[in-house]
Amino acid sequence: MEFEAVIGMEVHVQLNCKSKVFCGCSTNFHAPPNTNVCSVCLGMPGAMPVLNREMVTKSVAVGLALDCTISRWSKMDRKNYFYPDQSKNYQISQYDLPINHDGFLDIEVDGKSKRIGITRAHMEEDTARNTHTLGGGHSGVDFNRCGLPLLEIVTEPDIRSADEAFAFLTELKQILQYLGVSDCNMEEGALRAEANISIRPKGTEPFGTKTEVKNVASFSGTYKAIEYEIARQTQVLNEGGKVIQETRGWDDDRGVTFSQRAKESAHDYRYFPEPDLVPIVVDEAWEKSIHELQPELPAPRRARMVADYGLSVYDAGVLTQTRAMADYFEATTALAPDAKKVANWITGDLQALISNAEGDIRVIKITPTQLAAMINLIEDGTISGKIAKEVLVDMFQSGDDPKAIIEAKGLVQISDTGELEQRIAAVLATHPAQVEEFRSGKEKVIGFLVGQVMKATQGKANPKMVNEILRKQLSN
Amino acid sequence: MSDWFNKTAFEIREAVAQGDVSAREVTTSFLDRIEAVDGAVGAYTQLWNDDALAQADAVDAKVKAGEALGALAGVPISLKELICTTSGETTCSSRILNGFQSPYNATVTKKLLAADAIVLGKVNMDEFAMGSSTENSAIQKTANPWKLSCVPGGSSGGSAASVASATSALSFGSDTGGSIRQPAAFCGCVGLKPTYGRVSRYGLVAFASSLDQIGPLSKDVRDAALALNVITGKDPLDATSADLPAEDFTQALTGDVKGLKIGLPKEYFVDALSSEVRTMVEASIEVLKAQGAEFVEISLPHTDYAVAVYYIVAPAEASANLARFDGVRYGFRHPDAKNVAELYVKTKTEGYGKEVQRRIMLGTYVLSSGYYDAYYLKAQKVRTLIKQDFDEAFKQCDVILTPTAPAPAFTMGEKSSDPLEMYLNDIFTISANLAGIPGISLPCGLSESGLPVGLQLLGKAFDEATLLRTAHCYEANAGISLGTPPIA
Ligand SMILES: [Zn+2]
């Protein structure tokens, strides 16, 4: 039988607020264990939560980016469960009135656009980290992470394949980074994706029994886990078995999912409104002020890049991967009008330099102004493209202006016709055999001769002029 | 040495400020009084003699230096076991918090210290404020100073017994369903529950967060007004605290109630009310009438449901509030637990008393899936109706007058075996918490058996001024001065 996958995602995003959701503690959870803690996040008797306004602002920003309806009136609830990853044995979350609901995100797979429904995106506090490696029969609890601002984004079961899931996560991450609300570091748990996966015979409506795959540390892991899970469930059903509702983990080394906990739905969290907090009111004015500060998001920016600069869809996609790179591109091309060339320099040589240095375009020494100046120096013939590559390396290391580097190193291109004629004549004189070959019809040999000229001029000869003069002298 | 312990907070503050007496002398007078009578009463669970004297000396130094004095300078006070203090322990009279030292002071504690009050120590209560007799304390029994075989009421029984036996000039308790007003009535003192949000709850160990409110117990109404001045105010640490302009409530005590409309809810003058209490409350109506107040009969039609609603909402919130006491981070931890689940079960089973366990189970049940709508949600809806009853009633009157409790203090052990009968003690006080409005209990006489009887006044939300004015006028004209009981 042919099956179709039905997938919904739950994505937990740590919002990069300065302080925790309900207290003034720093959100730096890399500090030594239990140093960024206070009476509130430790759940001391009598301590009370106060909602961080920045948390609401950033949550609404995400909601707006996902085309959600923003709740004018929402509230926090207590989610009760006993486990030592919460100081109070309840988590403050949002139950029936999430701050954002009913939105969508459009993704593109194989050139086709698809809309993924967003059920809700609600605010909650992160849990503490448990470690079981202390020995001596003890487990450790680090409350630095307890109370960090967390936004849980839940999709409709609209996703049909691992490719779509991957595209969704990539697009979502890009949006979050554009908004500047999260550093989205998956290894550090700033972004945690869970997939609810079930399959059903193609063309039928009812959902099959789902499994929930948790604790996957990368998007590619999620992709592989979904592929695996679809195959596994298909095999179970084809063999006449039944899929068991359960939570499954992902073993990246072995490339398999494995059973962790049966029947998640058996949990009764006994949600009720958090009486220590007042309702959250986001009025039109507040929503508007957040809306006005929204940056241009990746999808519209990609479209605009294609329209405004004549870039290919591919180039636009690469350049908009991060807001910083797109900003860098636009700042550069404002001063160096050949957008295609600017794009090539940024996605090619510059990106390679950054990657090799494990750097970040936001903090590199080369400014867009300098890069534009360098590109313009090629355009006006001052340096050759080949020399420019060398200059760029120097700029990347020193942060100096291209002009200063070129002058200091004597890299200015030789575009003086007289000088070039002399140099070329000298090269031809020392290679009579090749000259003969050319004249007897072996046109290809001109490449060798150009190379010899460049070598003689340490690459500084204007290649276009070399070509012209060579042909002229050869045809004499 | 004169009996400073018999003076009001107001008088003490005046005398200390005038230099008529030193704070040390006042404090010593109270410490001696505690030494003399608290063995029999058992109000204090912790006594901080040295700290108290050091605080007194600091006040005296201020007086000497001519520095500005706080509003409670030199006034010896006590705090209920659930108000967080960095001094001593904060146990909620529970085994599960035995030895627990709070890392911070409650906002109310900070305000009292800033007002130069002298904290003598902490006083007993029903475990986690669950009870109406202070018999649910895991620490000790507290007696009613008027009759030692009787209960002082609860849950702020230690506070009421302490003020009544003159071992503190003021005590600060908490009221979730009558826990300040009912013991005040039983012990013959004044007990004020402010409007929900009037006083910060930060550092009050929560029983039921949407109902709890800290308030003073005092010898008279003026002291209640003075104490309220000190503890009110918006607290950035308590999101539910109200942001209102500061008021001097002592200025409200004009003695004038002419034209004031006082409502008498017919649902409160019912069979459950003892005839003795009814007679005394009716007499109090005459006192206020003689001063020019007008009385109107009003109706609070959903009164009958108040106890049922309360015993769903309060345990539900408590079941979550008390979840944190699990032996993981602080407090009692059962030594024999072999894994996390066992740690929770054993710690809580041995750490909590019966009544606390009963309410946690009740609260867990009403929040459970499948029962939530029928219990918790329905209770919240009825709570809204009860609140609307008061909104309607206050269109016809400024203040509501009722008895505080159906009968005077009962004998120890008399009701401790029947929780339902115990719960009915709060039928007149619970509604004010559900509606969030302020209430005050003040003495209106002694019963035939020599036990105090309390009169309750309820006011509009954030209109403590009118409430205190009415209470003060009654107190000034009723000619009832219970004085300090002979403790024996
Ligand atoms: Zn904290």
Image (cartoon, grey):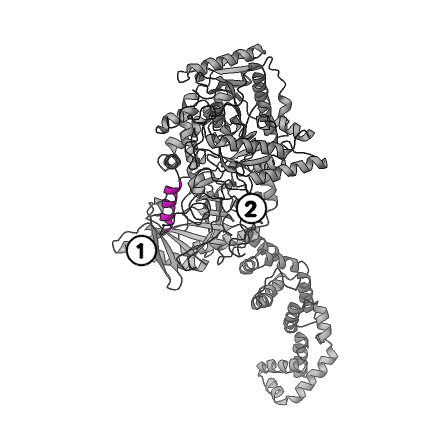
> Residue at the spot x=45%, y=42% of the render?
B97
Of A127 and B175, the residue lying toward us:
B175
Which class describes the residues within 10 Å of circle 1: few (<14), some (14-19), or many (20+)?
many
Who's the residue at 68% across and 61% down the image?
A: A369
State the residue at coordinates (40%, 62%). Answer: A252
- Quadrant of the frame with the N terminus of chain B: top right
Image position, residue B409 (x, y; %): 43, 23
Residue nearest the viewer, comparing B224 with B268: B224
Q: Quadrant of residue B307?
A: top left
Q: Nearer the viewer, residue A186 or A314?
A: A186
Query: Does residue B348 belong to the magenta stretch?
Result: yes
Q: CA distance from mark 1 to mark 2?
A: 40 Å
B95, A58: nearer the viewer: B95
Q: Which residue position is annotated with label 2? A: A58
Residue marked by disc 1: A234
Amino acid found under the numbered disc labelled 1: Thr
Give the mark toward the camera: 1 or 2. 2
Q: Is residue B186 magenta?
A: no
Q: Is residue A112 visible?
A: no
Find numbered disc 2 in the image and state the secondary structure of the residue it sits on.
helix
Q: Which residues are magenta?
A: B332-352
* x and y percentages locating residue A353 in the rendered image: 59, 68
Mark 1 or mark 2: whose residue is earlier in sequence: 2
Residue type indicated by callout 2: Lys
Q: Chain of mark 1?
A: A
Label 2 chain ID:
A
Label 2 beta carbon less than 8 Å to ligand 1: no
Q: Is residue A242 left or right of residue B264?
A: left
